[in-house]
Image (cartoon, rainbow, N blue to C red):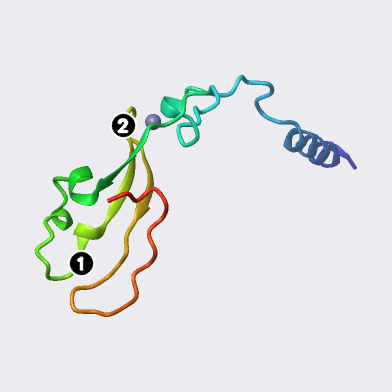
Amino acid sequence: MSTDWKEGVAKHKVARQTPAVAEVPGPRPRKNRKQWCRGKVGTEHKPVCRTYAETKPTCMLAKDDGSAFRTADWRILVCTTCGKELDHYYPLTFAGSDWPKRPPPTWVDK
Ligand SMILES: [Zn+2]
């Protein structure tokens, strides 16, 4: 009786435990654009408070017609250098509702 099959199983096991591709240089680490402006370490974002309509003039929601959402109250914290949206403030008040407004974050200045 041959034990070939046992050797085969052993080889298969080894093959499974050995990484198929060893030590391949990976892609360059992603730039941290969330923390640094344009991903350049040490460069701070220059955030400015803008209205939703200013930031997204093409969005249909930006045309606040006073019916559904009061998007005029929405604010977006945008970096003036790279354009990244750093924070959002949606009070989520509905026209005609008396729900209490969420207090705006400190960066909301208008
Ligand atoms: Zn930036």
Residue farthest front in this picture: 109
- Between discs 2 and 1, the one toward the N terminus: 1
Secondary structure state at the residue bearing disc 1: loop
Crowding at mark 1 (Cα within 10 Å: few <14, some 14-19, many 20+): some
Residue occupying image coordinates x 68% and y 21% = 23
Q: Mark 1 points at which residue?
A: 69
- Of residue 31 and residue 11, the one placed in the foreground of this image is 31
Q: Quadrant of residue 48?
A: top left
Q: Is residue 72 above or below residue 2?
A: below
Q: Is residue 65 above or below residue 5?
A: below
- Of residue 76 and residue 23, the one placed in the foreground of this image is 76
Q: In this view, does 95 lie above or below 104?
A: below
Q: Position of residue 62 (x, y in %)?
A: 16, 54
Residue type at numbered disc 2: Thr
Q: Position of residue 82 (x, y in %)?
A: 34, 29
Q: Mark 2 points at which residue?
A: 80
Q: Is residue 48 left or right of residue 20?
A: left
Residue occupying image coordinates x 71% and y 31% = 19
Beta carbon at label 2 within 8 Å of ligand 1: yes
Q: Where is residue 55 in the image (x, y as percent from the top left)?
A: 22, 43
Residue type at numbered disc 1: Phe
Which numbered disc covers residue 100? none
Q: In which quarter of the image is ligand 1?
A: top left
Q: In this view, does 34 lie to the left or right of 74?
A: right
Q: Label 2, label 1: how many angstroms apart (C-alpha)?
A: 26 Å
Residue occupying image coordinates x 85% and y 41% = 6
Q: Is residue 76 left or right of residue 34?
A: left
Crowding at mark 2 (Cα within 10 Å: few <14, some 14-19, many 20+): some
Residue farthest left in this picture: 65
Residue occupying image coordinates x 38% and y 67% = 102
Secondary structure state at the residue bearing disc 2: loop
Q: In this view, does 106 lie to the left or right of 65?
A: right
